[in-house]
Amino acid sequence: MHSRRDRERAASTWLVLAASDREKAWTEWDTYRVALLRCGSLFSAVRIPAHLVYAAAGTEEPERVRGFLAEVLDGGPVFLDVGGQQFYALTPASAPRSWRLTVAECLDSDTFLGVPATDVTEYDPRCPAYWALPMDGPGALCAPDDVAHLVLIGHQEAAKNAEADR
């Protein structure tokens, strides 16, 4: 059995392999709490507008959203870009090849993504992003079908909410 700290360290070591300059990535995490990592080699990410996640979860309350994401994504890692109001679900690098949904973009190898340090798991106004659902260890990613299911639920609920508001 490994502690949460051991899993965070192992996940960080794995994630940093996606950096074009690993030392710079470690420094960025230490200094800014976010490092630029390239999608497409180890992982990809699906960018999901926050309003879709909140609509799917039926709440914006962070702990309830975290619980909802854990259930729907089977514990797969997701972080929130607070300023951009976008959630990012980390998926296998192959995910962009089969991604078909237009309401959420699956980032490919042309994309650098600002990924929070693995120990940033709560909102902090000094940090632009945090893990809504932290990585459980190296290579522990979301299944693309689970992410697509989340996006579809969110899209349907957001449409129902918009219709009800009319």
Image (cartoon, rainbow, N blue to C red):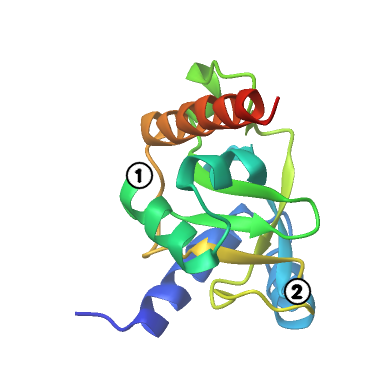
* Quarter of the view holding residue 109: top right
- Circle 2 SS class: loop
The one of 68 and 148 positioned closer to us in this rendering? 68
Residue on which disc 1 sits: 72
The one of 5 and 129 positioned closer to us in this rendering? 129
Please state the horizontal and vertical placement of residue 76, each as a whole percent of the image. 39, 52
Query: Which label sits in the foreground, 2 or 1?
Result: 1
Choose the circle earlier in sequence order: 2 or 1. 1
- Circle 1 SS class: helix
Q: Is residue 39 visible?
A: no
The type of residue carrying mark 1 is: Val
In this rendering, is residue 16 above or below 98? below
Left or right: residue 86 versus residue 9 is: right
Quadrant of image for the N terminus: bottom left
Q: Is residue 65 visible?
A: yes
Task: Count residues near mark 1 (Cα–Cα under 10 Å), then give few for <14, some for 14-19, many for 20+.
Answer: some
**Residue under the image location 45 percent in, 36 percent down:** 150
The type of residue carrying mark 2 is: Cys
